[in-house]
Image (cartoon, helix red, strand yellow):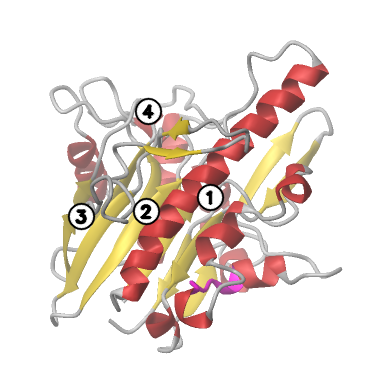
Amino acid sequence: MRIATYNIEWFIGLFDRRGRILDDDMPSSRYEVTRHEQLHALGAVFRAMDADGVMIVEAPDHDPRRHPTPAMLEAFAERFHLRARSCLIGYANETQQEIAFLYDPDRLAVFHDPQGGVPGDGRAPRFDTQTRIDLNIDGKVDTIRFNKPPLEIAARTAKGREFRMIGVHLKSKAPRDATTDAEVQRLAIANRREQLAQCLWLRERILEHLRAGESLLVMGDLNDGPGLDEYEKLFGRSAVEIVMGWDEPKAERLFDPHARAALGRKLAAAPATARFFLPEQDQFFSAMLDYIMVSPDLRSTKPRWRIWHPFDDPACYRDARLREALLTASDHFPVSIDLEL
């Protein structure tokens, strides 16, 4: 079975406010890319992946009356004759960037299955609620919320194998309101601290599943990685290390080979899943942001991970049409895993 995660930049820009697909030569929200070009590039990428399920990060904005996310993504799947043609979402958010799962209903049955405890029972609260933690280590408790609540999925294969998935999009807000260098630094540190608190909340849920002996995949865009910015040294650990349980007992660790390669690198080049243009430097910047982490039992089945990178993956590079489609479709590239389920 092939499961993938894919962050699609401004997917919402390919639909009108009634949820209808926009296939024309008007500009998309991607720089110097038309809606027709981005739409058909995405179709080519999805067809090439041919995944049984895709966790879509930055899926189109959900409005249950005018443009529900499942209807838009199912129309996209129908347009390009994809096997993954049914869509599931969890808690909608107010950022115009939903987390959605597009899947093949002949191969998978999936359900939105949020977990969560009540105060005093020792379990992590539901992701659409809040948790309280002393962020500043000043004796004052802060309230933490997800602006993009993770999507918790209970899944069952056609053969009856049950497993769980959590789709995530963790993001440290940019210090846009800052006017001085000191304010930029203060807000950046505060936002990063809040992001890491969300990671700790997510890690609590992961531990609950692992200790219950459940097969688990955690996937999506963590918007953080080893060596990504100067604040990693300040806090000691990246979001990736917290979510994986990097230094915890093996039975409670998640595994992703690309995360391990990036965390363990010295002078070697690190893998990358995203490519951004930096105008001030007139060059591209690559980053490892997207992951598929698996529980120890799934790792033992020897799954195969793949970053669909247009330059780093030889098969993608040799296929000129796919290479150009990957560059046109989004500023992120898909990550997939092939595993026995």
Q: Where residue 135 is drawn, which disc sits there?
A: none
Compare marks 3 and 1 and give the one earlier in the sequence.
Answer: 3
Compare marks 2 and 4 and give the one earlier in the sequence.
Answer: 4
Q: Is residue 207 visible?
A: yes
What secondary structure is the stretch in magenta mostly built from?
loop
State which quarter of the image contains the C terminus.
Answer: bottom left
Question: Which amino acid is tagged 2?
Answer: Gly
Question: Which amino acid is tagged 4?
Answer: Gln
Looking at the rendered structure, the secondary structure element under dot 4 is: loop
State which quarter of the image contains the N terminus.
Answer: bottom left
Disc 4/disc 1 C-alpha distance (Å): 18 Å
- Circle 2 sits on which residue? 167
Q: Where residue 85 is drawn, which disc sits there?
A: 3
Q: Nearer the viewer, residue 13 or 168?
A: 168
Disc 4/disc 3 C-alpha distance (Å): 22 Å
Dividing the picture into quarters, in which one does residue 58 lie? top left
Q: Where residue 96 is drawn, which disc sits there?
A: 4
Proximity of marks 2 and 4: CB atoms separated by less than 8 Å: no
Question: Which amino acid is tagged 3?
Answer: Arg
Compare marks 2 and 3 and give the one earlier in the sequence.
Answer: 3
Left or right placement of residue 178 versus residue 95 in this view: right
Disc 2/disc 3 C-alpha distance (Å): 18 Å
Looking at the rendered structure, the secondary structure element under dot 1 is: loop
Disc 3/disc 1 C-alpha distance (Å): 26 Å
Compare marks 4 and 1 and give the one earlier in the sequence.
Answer: 4
Q: Look at the picture and state if 320 lies above or below 276.
A: below
Q: Nearer the viewer, mark 2 or mark 4?
A: 2
At x 37% / y 80%, what residue is drawn? 339
Q: What stretch is highlighted in magenta?
A: 253-258
- Circle 1 sits on which residue? 222
Does the magenta run of residues contain 228?
A: no
Compare marks 1 and 2 and give the one earlier in the sequence.
Answer: 2
